[in-house]
Image: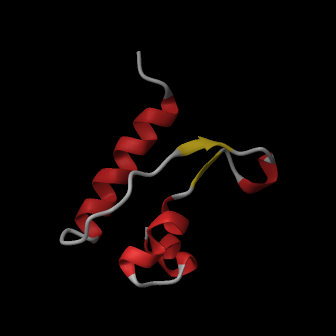
């Protein structure tokens, strides 16, 4: 059985490939949030790929 974090990482990666098909991306990490006020899970995708995508992390996160 896969951990939910791994399932979410795979889904995120597929979504990103649809939105940015021609850009090589760094693999995202999905983890549970330390503070439940911010939701159940979080990812570092927007921060680690902002330079490659030439967009602000917040813009990337909104698009996803």
37 left or right of 30?
Answer: right
Q: How many marks?
A: 0
Does 49 appear above or below 13? below
For the rendered model, the colour scheme is secondary structure
Does 9 appear above or below 17? above
Does 10 appear above or below 43? above
Give the x, y percent position of residue 49: 44, 68
Q: Quadrant of residue 55?
A: bottom left
Q: Residue at x 36, y 46 (%)?
A: 11
Quadrant occupied by the C terminus:
bottom left
Q: Residue at x 50, y 31 (%)?
A: 4
Quadrant occupied by the N terminus:
top left
6 left or right of 23?
Answer: right
In the orientation shown, which residue stands out farthest toward the left? Answer: 22
Give the x, y percent position of residue 29: 50, 46
Give the x, y percent position of residue 38: 74, 55
Give the x, y percent position of residue 18: 23, 64
10 left or right of 57?
Answer: left
Q: Residue at x 47, y 75 (%)?
A: 50
Given residues 15 and 29, the one toward you in this image is 29
Q: Quadrant of residue 57?
A: bottom right
């Amino acid at each position: 059985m896969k951990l939910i974090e791994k399932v979410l990482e795979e889904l995120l990666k597929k979504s990103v490939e649809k939105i940015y098909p021609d850009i090589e991306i760094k693999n995202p990490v999905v983890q549970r949030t330390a503070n439940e006020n911010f939701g159940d899970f979080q990812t570092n995708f927007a921060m680690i790929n902002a330079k490659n995508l030439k967009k602000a992390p917040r813009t990337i996160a909104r698009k996803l």
